[in-house]
Image (cartoon, coloured by chain):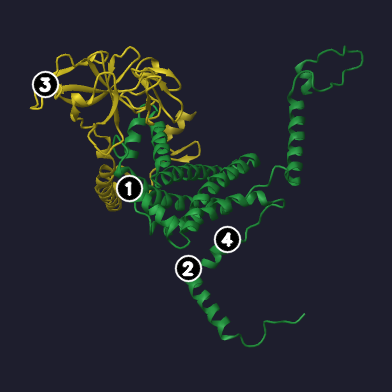
Chain colours: A yellow, B green
Amino acid sequence: MADSHEEHGSGVSGGQYLGPTAHTSEPVADPHDDPAYVTRTKFLSGVAVLTGAVMGAAILVPVVGFAVADTVKEEDWRWVDIGPLSDFPEGVTSVAVSGPFPESDRRAFIRHQDNSIIAIWNRCAHLGCPSSYSQGSDSYTCPCHGGSYDSLGRVIAGPPPRPLDRFDVKLVTPAGQDVAKTTSPAEGVSTRGAAPDSRVLVGIAFSIDEDQNPYRLHGPGEEVTGVLANLYPF
Amino acid sequence: MATKDIGPKSPLTKTGEAAVGYVDERSGVTTGAKWFLFRNIPKETSWFQTLGFTAMVLFALQAITGVILAMYYRPDTNGAFQSIDHITNEVTWGWLVRGMHKWGASAMIIVVFLHLGRVFIFGSYKYPRELTWVTGALLLVMTMFMGLTGYLLVWDQKAYWATVVAVNITASAPILGPYVADVLRAGPEFGPDTLSRFYSIHMLVIPGGMATFIGLHLFFVSKLGITEPPYSKRRMKVERQEAEARAAAEAERLPYGRRQVTAAPGATPSTPAREEVRS
């Protein structure tokens, strides 16, 4: 029945009028309907945001760089002349300054024993307080939290996670020719046959483990061996 | 009772009212002040809720005494301790102002922690006051950082080595710790730059941040109002009613055991089936 209705062309199907109408509106192409269309307002807002970002960066980048960049630079180590070999007689632990800042609180215990010199940094491996040497027990102790080290700086007691750090040592002639260099942290620099007026130079600092194997310099509180050493990858 | 507001006003009152009116018409400051000051507060509000204001007053004390101390203090490694000595022993009332700043700092830490504990125990951090808590937590961090940076400025042995230890604790944080410590001490070692950096952070960076966050904190407190204490009679009544309603609802929902089911005559009084409970 429905088919016969359509054949008649009555224009009525299910109550909706489908016949010819007086006016059919054509679809109008309005670019604003496209969400990707850039209007003047959108363009100017974008320009304002971009300009603000560039101006903000122009101020912030130099300021932050100025405040931070120099502080995280690698330290510039150099050899520091701490005096002639005769100042450091066999069997005596003495104190000298090292590092690039002469005014800094870095102190080295220059230990001359069995014809060999090692330089032990007094910075406690726990949290950086100054350790002191005691002649009687031939050991180092830190006043802050009770860290205690033996004659070679290895931990005896207290919280330090690793031995005291060392400085590299070498001997040169007064003219500046190398006489002897540190062969290994355990052996130090040999003074056998060196002239008493040879100059003792103290250089870059490094960390050691309990067996006196060298590692790059670690900060106080950092482990050099074991699982926790992985916490400080840089 | 005699009516007093009749007759011509005194010129002083007129001038004052005109001045307030002039500012208010252009800024709406009276509305703002009333919104901030004349709020409804719960019935059992007590001295416990005054700790936050106390902390703010101590901040103001620190700001004022700090500004005065900065007029005499010299942030360089050679002059710092001498200038502290000069303030304490030579400047008129210098001992008093420095003492106020020093003891005010300790008092502020104590009061801030009491305030924190009050907010925690009263449950005042709960919805909708989470952002008040967050801004307060940031204020706590900044207060502690003020303590750290201010401690170094005395530049005596105790100040120096205590701060060395504190910065090395920072450095022992994993991965980024060493860098944060380098930025704090302006290099690998404590030196002149460390002192002036701490001074700048102590007197410029953190106070600005703290003032901003105190403003935000106060805005949230004003907007959201303060909470009833947990021992409030009204709140306890509401909570008791809620607990009873919750218990009743649970009893409705529980299939077994909780609720006595009226059994049909002759039926076994054993565990009822789920459908029976629902009916």
Residue drawn at x 53%, y 53% as measured from the top left: B58
Above or below — where is A148 with respect to B234? above
- Give the secondary structure at mark 2: helix
Instruction: Tell me the residue that label 3 is attached to.
Output: A178
| Chain under callout 4 | B
Instruction: Tell me the residue that label 1 is attached to.
Output: B196
Residues behind callouts 1 and 3 on a single chain: no
Q: Residues within 10 Å of mark 1 (few under 14, many from 20)?
A: some
Q: CA distance from mark 1 to mark 2?
A: 40 Å
Q: Amino acid at mark 2?
A: Ser
Quarter of the image for residue A166 reads: top left
Q: Amino acid at mark 3?
A: Asp
Residue A30 makes an appearance in the image: no
Residue drawn at x 76%, y 38% as measured from the top left: B240
Residues behind callouts 1 and 2 on a single chain: yes
Above or below — where is B245 with respect to B228? above
Residue A108 makes an appearance in the image: yes
